[in-house]
Image (cartoon, coloured by chain):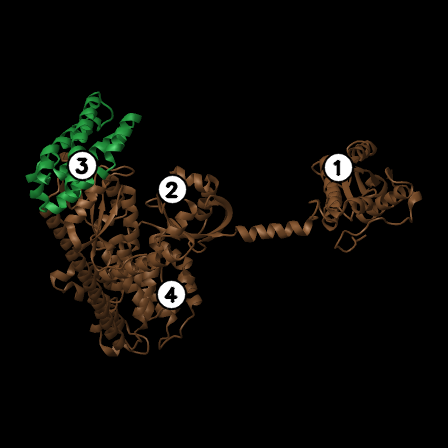
């Protein structure tokens, strides 16, 4: 699997990220580090415990990272989620969390597949 | 330890590690990158590194303290004037942008980051600020140079006048010092004249020109040794108006200078008097500008204390008396008060005047000038020195194994050395420590309050305090001594700005002292008081309550030798410890129990009721067994009612009563009676000790 194919699988915009970061090496480095970021775990835990302020920040961070890496799909849902939580809990948040979770899994899966391909 | 690097330092404050790394990668190797993962850490880093940091990249949404919080603190401390901030954020709402610009950010970078844009904006901002810093130092040098040149020119000019006048040149200097001192006193006393430190500086400098009009006075009149004729006096008096006219004739550009305006007032009116009897205009009271009033007084004072052809030099004291007594014309009562209240200060100032002070004054003026231009905060060189000190401090702080701390009131923050933070289990930086639960918990609310009160109660003259308390160090409560120095600002009045200090572990030495004290006062085996201490305590107690009913009993363990011989010394010790325990149980709080001999004990009881039932009860409770050994005691008792409150007499009586019991078969108690007088003592030495006294 190539980096381009990985981007296609996770719903990202490879051309856009290359235009900004200007180095394939750099993109690859940060894509692989995406899975180390703790914000997703923090988001799940904060939603679970009803700490919506923390959940807002976590969604906001995911959004920021996605924007930087041009992970368009997950970037959009996490952005919507952070808006839904900006001033505390709103009912829309529940459905959006589910969407973020599904798209995060999709993203993570694509990155793992790419990881295996580059390792092998 | 700190790495010394020539690279410019950029601080990235962002809660996402990924985002920080991406930015760091984009900026590449040209800069040294410092990272902070929330606002608090960012502020701490700014506090620690100051203007070493060339640029801050600041995220908005962060835990603990967000980007706006950081900007607020940077504004409060005026760091924002020296350290540029670029906001990074996915927030694009215009209110955010506006608020950030209002708080002094230089630029915005929005996500997603574009490598070229990030690098370009960073480079531009860093360059812009570097250029500005260079300009600041250039301007500061120039202001200093200008200040120096102009005071030099004034000095030369006034010396020319004095030289012609046959004076030493000290007159101008003295008038300057007097004018400055009196005006400062007046400013503190009243705001009637709206004086500012800048006005005082201008008036004092202008005072040097008060007699320039004398240039136009013919030398024969100026230096005439005898009395003036009325015509000559009229010529002489013209010098004030002439001086004013000379200044008025200056080109327009100069006439509006505050210095020239002040000099004009002084030249023209420094011979006016409060009651209107002066010259040239006969102005009275506050029609005379305050500048001229002050110089008039200074001029008179210095004339009195200087030698002239027609008079000797009067002493400082005498000159003040003559002025206050109205012998030299009338002056503004407020100004006279200033003179009277500051007579000592004036003498000190005049005596202590030298080139050094002159320099200090110049430096103060430079500082004031710099202060006027808000954008000019300090010269480059001062900043370098400051950085050097900061580096030195953090280097030594990192090396030392000491808990050192620094507290600032604004922003409220405690900084600990790395070693100290670990020791106390606290972070190196705590914002708002008085409301931080963790540090309140670790250090104890009482300690905080005690320490804060002690520091607040200091004065700039005596800023050092010591404070002893128990602190949780490495999870163990230990005695510590906190030595701290409060820091006070140099404003008037001084403000308490924080403190620096260190925590010294005095636990071991304190415990040793406690232990030594305990060893010196207690019997090592039984833990009861020793004889010497018991005696002292009993004497104190008897002296405290001379009317109390006390009983002193000496108790001897019967057949103790047998216990030792049969079961061994270890067993014997066990018996003694057992008995000591029993004794402790049957006495009350104020009572005293001691071991006074090998197998002898002593107790002092206060008896509210009858003595005998109490003794009876104690005697009964001591009987019993220790393992195989049946315990039986003999007891001799003496009371203060019978024997008085002299300890030695009381002890001797109890001892003799005990002897009587021993002789008549043991296992009983007896009160002393006169028939026992002259009997022997039974007190035996404790192993390894001298026989007890008495």
Q: Is residue A34 placed above or below B165 in the rendered structure? A: above
Chain letter of the residue beneath label 4 in the structure image: B
In the image, which is nearer the foreground, mark 1 or mark 2? 1
Of labels 2 and 4, earlier in sequence is 4
Q: From the top left corner, tell me how far across and down residue B467 is, in percent.
A: 49, 49
Q: Which residue is mark 3?
A: A112
Residue B433: numbered disc:
2
Mark 1 vs mark 4, CA separation in Å: 89 Å
Q: Position of residue B240 (x, y in %)?
A: 24, 66
Tell me, yes or no, whether the two marked residues, 1 and 4, touch with CB atoms within 8 Å: no
Residues packed near mark 3 inside 10 Å, few (<14), some (14 to 19) or many (20 plus)? some
Q: Give the foreground label among 2 and 3.
A: 3
Q: Sequence order check: which comes first, mark 1 or mark 4?
A: 4
**Which chain shows up in green?**
A
The reply to the same-chain question for discs 3 and 4 is no
Tags 2 and 4 on a common chain: yes
Residue B627, numbered label = 1
| Towards the viewer: A27 or B233 | A27
Q: For the point 18% across and 31% down, which residue is it?
A: A104
């Amino acid at each position: 699997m190539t980096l381009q194919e990985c981007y296609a699988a996770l719903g990202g915009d490879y051309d856009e990220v290359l235009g900004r970061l200007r180095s394939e090496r750099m993109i690859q480095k940060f894509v692989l580090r995406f899975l180390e970021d703790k914000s997703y775990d923090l988001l799940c835990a904060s939603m679970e415990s009803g700490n919506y302020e923390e959940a807002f920040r976590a969604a906001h961070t995911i959004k920021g990272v996605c924007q930087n890496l041009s992970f368009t799909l997950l970037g959009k849902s996490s952005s919507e989620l952070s808006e839904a939580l900006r001033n505390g809990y709103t009912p829309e948040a529940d459905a959006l969390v589910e969407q973020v979770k599904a798209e995060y899994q999709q993203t993570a899966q694509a990155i793992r597949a790419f990881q295996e391909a580059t390792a092998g | 330890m700190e790495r010394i690097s020539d690279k410019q330092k950029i601080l990235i404050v962002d809660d996402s590690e990924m985002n920080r790394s991406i930015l760091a990668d984009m900026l590449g190797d040209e800069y040294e990158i410092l990272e902070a993962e929330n606002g608090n850490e960012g502020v701490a880093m700014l506090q620690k590194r100051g203007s070493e940091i060339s640029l801050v990249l600041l995220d908005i949404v962060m835990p603990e303290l967000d980007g706006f919080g950081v900007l607020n603190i940077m504004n409060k401390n005026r760091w924002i004037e020296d350290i540029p901030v670029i906001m990074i954020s996915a927030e694009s709402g215009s209110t955010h942008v506006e608020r950030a610009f209002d708080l002094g950010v230089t630029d915005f970078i929005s996500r997603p980051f574009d490598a070229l844009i990030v690098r370009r904006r960073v480079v531009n901002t860093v360059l812009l600020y570097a250029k500005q810093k260079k300009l600041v130092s250039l301007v500061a040098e120039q202001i200093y140079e200008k200040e120096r040149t102009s005071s030099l020119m004034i000095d030369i000019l006034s010396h020319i006048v004095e030289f012609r006048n046959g004076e030493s040149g000290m007159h101008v200097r003295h008038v300057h010092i007097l004018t400055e001192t009196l005006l400062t006193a007046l400013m503190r006393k009243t705001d009637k004249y709206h004086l500012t430190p800048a006005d005082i500086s201008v008036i004092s400098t202008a005072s040097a020109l008060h007699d320039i009009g004398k240039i136009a006075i013919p030398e024969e009149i100026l230096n005439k040794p005898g009395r003036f004729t009325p015509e000559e006096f009229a010529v002489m008096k013209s010098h004030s108006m002439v001086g004013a006219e000379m200044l008025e004739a200056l080109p327009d550009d100069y006439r509006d200078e505050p210095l020239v305006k002040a000099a004009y007032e002084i030249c023209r009116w420094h011979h006016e008097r409060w009651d209107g009897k002066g010259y040239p205009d006969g102005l009275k009271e506050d029609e005379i500008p305050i500048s001229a009033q002050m110089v008039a007084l200074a001029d008179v004072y210095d004339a009195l204390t200087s030698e002239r052809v027609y008079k000797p030099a009067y002493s400082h004291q005498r000159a003040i008396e003559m002025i206050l007594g109205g012998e030299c014309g009338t002056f503004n009562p407020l100004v006279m008060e200033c003179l009277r209240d500051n007579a000592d200060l004036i003498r000190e100032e005049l005596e202590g005047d030298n080139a050094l002070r002159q320099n200090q004054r110049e430096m103060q003026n430079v500082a004031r000038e710099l202060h006027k231009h808000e954008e000019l905060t300090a010269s480059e060189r001062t900043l370098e020195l400051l950085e050097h000190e900061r580096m030195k401090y953090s280097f030594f702080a990192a090396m030392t194994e000491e808990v050192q701390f620094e507290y600032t009131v604004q922003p409220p923050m405690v900084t600990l050395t790395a070693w100290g933070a670990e020791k106390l289990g606290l972070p190196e930086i705590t914002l708002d420590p008085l409301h931080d639960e963790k540090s309140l918990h670790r250090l104890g609310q009482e300690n905080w309050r005690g320490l804060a009160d002690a520091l607040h109660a200091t004065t700039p003259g005596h800023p050092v305090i010591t404070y002893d308390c128990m602190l949780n160090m490495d999870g163990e409560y230990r005695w510590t001594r906190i030595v701290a120095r409060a820091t006070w600002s140099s404003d008037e009045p001084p403000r308490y700005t924080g403190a620096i200090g260190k925590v010294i572990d005095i636990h071991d030495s304190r415990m040793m002292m406690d232990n030594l004290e305990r060893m010196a006062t207690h019997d090592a085996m039984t833990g009861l008081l020793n004889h010497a201490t018991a005696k002292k305590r009993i004497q104190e107690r008897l002296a405290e309550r001379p009317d109390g009913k006390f009983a002193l009993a000496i108790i001897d363990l019967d057949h103790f030798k047998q216990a030792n011989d049969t079961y061994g010394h270890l067993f014997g010790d066990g018996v003694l410890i057992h008995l000591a325990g029993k004794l402790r149980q049957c006495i009350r709080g104020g009572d005293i129990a001691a071991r006074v001999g090998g197998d002898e004990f002593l107790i002092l009881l206060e008896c509210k009721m009858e003595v005998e039932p109490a003794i009876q009860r104690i005697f009964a409770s001591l009987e019993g067994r220790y393992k195989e050994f049946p315990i039986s005691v003999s007891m001799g008792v003496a009371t203060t009612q019978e024997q008085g409150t002299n300890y030695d007499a009381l002890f001797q009586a109890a001892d003799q009563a005990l002897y009587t019991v021993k002789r008549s078969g043991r296992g009983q108690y007896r009160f002393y009676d006169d028939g026992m007088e002259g009997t022997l003592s039974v007190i035996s030495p404790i192993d390894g000790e001298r026989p007890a006294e008495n």
